Image (cartoon, rainbow, N blue to C red):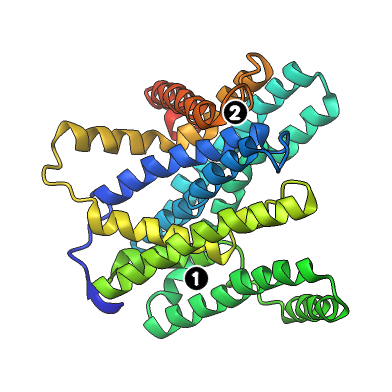
Amino acid sequence: MNDKAVNKLPSARERVDYLDALRVVAIVFVLMIHTIFQSFNNMSVHSWQWQTLNIYDSISRWSVPVFVMISGALFLDSKKPFKEILKKNVLRLVTAYLFWSLIYAVLCQIYYNNFDSTLNMILKGHYHMWFIPMMIGLYLVTPFIRKIVEEKSLIRLFLILALIFAFFLPDLLKTLEVFKTPVSIKLIDFINTTKTHMYLFMPLGYTGYFVLGYVLYKFEISKKLEWVIYLLGIAGLVYTIAATLIRSKAGNAAYVGYYDYQTTNVAAMAAAVFVFFKKHYHVKNSDSKLSKAVRTLSGYSFGVYLVHMVVIDYMTNKLHFTPSSFNPIISTPLICLITVVVSFAISAVLNSIKGLNKYIV
């Protein structure tokens, strides 16, 4: 990458077409992950049905990191004052989190009639809601990260540290755990102890994706580097499928460590998808019906993220309709498609309600 911008970057009020399209596609694959989760641990890892879910799940794993990358691209390039971020973005996330945690708690009580689970749902939120506190944290440190991305040398250092401590070392630990030899056990203890004593928190978590999204958005990517990123992305996908299959069969139980969003294989996939949309999603007429539809759906994506588990939980608990209901090659995308359509419809309705649309979707 070099300092030359790809083109004139949009102002805060303008839309970035490929980011809108990327957001719409990403939310579909997020729903695919949560669709698969309903049956993933209920099938034999030696069956072709489970292997089908493994492939679908592996293909979808780039989606969550890409949402963080999109936010990094927009927030780190924006000059939006921190007070505005607090009043508009953080407040919206907080209110949405509280509202939907209550909704899911009520549904939990209806489905399971378990007060402890319901109370836990109120305090911690539905399992998919972890994303919101994480994003709140990123928004709160945005002013600091903006200072980092002002200099190329600091960007490079930050990404190197993130690659080593947030991605490579955890991956190395997963590999060492397989061997269970005296040497591997000592190495695991050494790495964990060293990481703990370094207190190197700044490049950990999802800040690496936040900065990476900004870098891929902001700077020009040569054709050679583009293809390298694609090849790494394909390698990451193959590795995710194969490593998950091999380790799950070896342990006779589903192993999801290679699905972790903070793995080098998933990061490679996320970077490849982001770059692909940047390079190849071009809008000739921004006023066309298709472009307007994509922008509209993009605006509904946060609401879809919040509401989609209502749809999935209903199909699971009331209709008993999951990927294991019949051939998962067909059932998985079918359930995902139904969830996508219903969730977008609900989000559209909620977004049309003035006042509420600023706080709960």
Q: Earlier in the sequence, mark 2 or mark 1?
A: 1
Tell me what residue is drawn at x 58 percent, y 72 percent: 203
Q: Judge the density around disc 1: few (<14), some (14-19), many (≥20) Cα neighbours within 10 Å.
A: few
Residue placed at 42% from the left, 37% from the top?
301
Q: Is residue 218 above or below residue 21?
A: below
Q: Amino acid at mark 2?
A: Pro
Q: Work out whether residue 222 can be spotted.
A: no
Mark 2 residue element: loop
Which residue: 62% across, 22% down?
325
Mark toward the viewer: 2 or 1: 2
130 vs 140, left or right, is right
Q: On the picture, is 309 further left or further right than 174?
A: left
Q: Which residue is mark 2?
A: 323
Residue 191 image-quadrant placement: bottom right
Q: Residue at x 28, y 79 (%)?
A: 2
Q: Which residue is mark 1?
A: 144
Instruction: Please name whichever residue, 81 or 64, is drawn nearer the observer in this view of the structure.
Output: 64
User: In the rendered structure, which amino acid carries the disc numbered 1?
Assistant: Phe
Measure how far apart labels 2 and 1 are at the Cα level.
44 Å
